[in-house]
Amino acid sequence: MSRAMQTCLGSCHCGAVRFEIETDFPELTMCDCSICRRKNALMVKVHESKFRLLAGEESLTEYQFHTLTARHFFCKVCGIYPFHRKRVTPDNLGINVFCLHDFDPAGIPVRQAVGAGMP
């Protein structure tokens, strides 16, 4: 089922980091890697051209592990994880849909991504 393209606003908990994405929400993903299991985030993949950081670049801190390829971003103030730059497709971001304002993930297919088994 094709969904209409939507523009969504998102933020961390304290509002220091604010962003905007454009997507038709083809699917959501959950990853089984060590950090994603602990974050328990539900993600939508968005091309970097469809992502705009509106505020808070100075409030972001970055965490990398394993191959040091994926870039996981957190708010320094409230600790919330709003997005990451993907490892396999670095021109895309994984957006934590629980950081999107007034977003309901009901009805969008969820795919289990395999991260733990990646070399």
Image (cartoon, grey):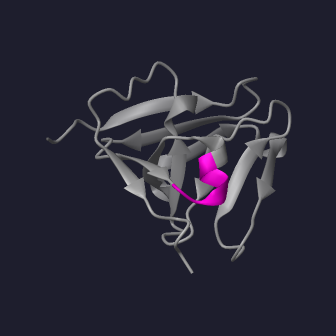
Q: Residue at x 30, y 41 (%)?
A: 24
Residue 5 figure quarter: top left
Residue 52 figure quarter: top right
Is residue 35 rendered magenta in the image? Answer: yes
Is residue 48 rendered magenta in the image? Answer: no
Residue 35 figure quarter: bottom right
In percent of width and height, residue 58 lies at: 84, 44
In percent of width and height, residue 73 lies at: 71, 50
Examine the rendered structure and indicate whether residue 31 appears above or below residue 79. Answer: below
Examine the rendered structure and indicate whether residue 94 appears above or below residue 4. Answer: below
In percent of width and height, residue 44 lies at: 43, 46
Left or right, residue 95 beside residue 71: left
Magenta span covers which residues?
32-37
In percent of width and height, residue 33 lies at: 58, 60
Examine the rendered structure and indicate whether residue 37 appears above or below residue 118. Answer: above
Q: Residue at x 29, y 36 (%)?
A: 108
